Amino acid sequence: MKRFNRNIIFFGVDGQRILRESVVAVVGCGGLGHHVIQQLAYLGVKKIIAIDDEVLSLTNKNRYVLAYDDDPITGFHKVDLIKRSVYMIDPSIEVETVHASLRSAKAIVALKQADVIFGCLDDDGPRFILNEFALAYDKELFDLASDTDNEGMLIYGGRMVYVRPDEPGCLVCMDVLNMNVVTKFLSSENGRRDREDLYGVDKTQLEEGGPSVVSLNGIIASLAVMEYMLQATGIRKAKKKLEYRGNMGIVAVKNEINIDDCHYCKNVRGVADATNLERYL
Ligand SMILES: [Zn+2]
């Protein structure tokens, strides 16, 4: 435990023990996920479940803090990179890798083991499924998103939203999802994202995705991991929503949410397998 002495000065031996017993799943091992996993490893959680179906590419290397220059870009599974890097930080942390989409039985089975889930996804379709999963199985969910407008970079920032099992408020009723994108995702044959819709620009102009930088991802990830750490160690309750408005240089807090009769909060919460996530797979 000596390596955690400086953590323990912050949140106590009991806080460190709680983290050391925590199983945390990270869905999406991209720019946000790298920061989140790096910080979870340094905090000293028990186990990290990394879920992602993609491979590393050259343009990931401007922001993936766990990737190195000589990491191969031909078929290197992003989840294997995570396993390697967590081992280098702290080999006592267990890492389970799931090289599969969230829309797979493998991912759903793995997520059921988690105490806490970090959603580090690029788009709202899988976020919607993850929200339903977290509600149905009473999991804590920290959902992260970084946002840029692509129109001269007038608006840029991001947010983290915390969905907790013991209080109303989810990604649907907190109004953070674009339901048109969700509907299209759910109706598509294999759930592949349509980048033209996502980013509002011709996808042929983009090698892979819109603007994404290490510092913006780092802020959003740090906001979420900080709230997780404070909540888990009992220092204070995590905020429901923190929004970083980079163009203004501020973080806005939203803790009171007006929820009108949310179907998901009311009817899906706690129903476990009865929610039938298989319909999305
Ligand atoms: Zn809700």
Image (tube, grey):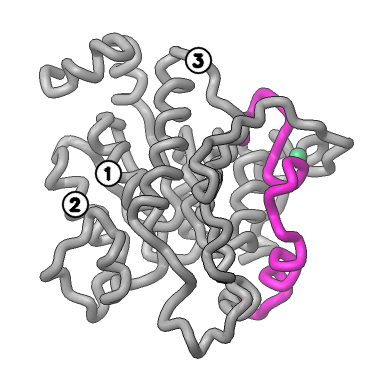
Q: In this view of the protein, can residue 138 be seen by the observer?
A: no
Q: Choose the circle earlier in sequence order: 3 or 1.
A: 1
Residue drawn at the location 12% of the way across and 46% of the way down: 88
- Relative to 115, does residue 36 appear above or below in the rendering? below
State the image coordinates of residue 160 (x, y, percent, origin top left): 54, 41
CA separation in Å, label 2 and label 3: 30 Å
SS for callout 3: loop
- For this rendering, which residue is in front, 157 or 35? 157
- Relative to 90, does residue 246 appear above or below in the rendering? below
Q: Is residue 174 magenta?
A: yes
Quadrant in which the C terminus appears: bottom right
Residue range in magenta is: 162-190
According to the image, label 1 marks what residue? 38
State the image coordinates of residue 174 (x, y, percent, origin top left): 73, 41
- For this rendering, which residue is in front, 11 or 14? 11
Q: Amino acid at mark 2?
A: Ser
Residue drawn at the location 54% of the way across and 85% of the way down: 203
SS for callout 1: helix
Quadrant in which the N terminus appears: top left
State the image coordinates of residue 117 (x, y, percent, origin top left): 48, 41
- Relative to 30, does residue 191 appear above or below in the rendering? below
Which of the 4 quarters of the picture holds residue 229? top left
Label 1 or label 2, whichever lies nearer to me, is 1
The crowding category of the residue bearing disc 3, from other C-alpha atoms within 10 Å (few below 14, some 14 to 19, many at least 20), is few
Q: Are the two marked residues, 1 and 2, in contact with CB atoms closer than 8 angstroms?
A: yes
According to the image, label 2 marks what residue? 85
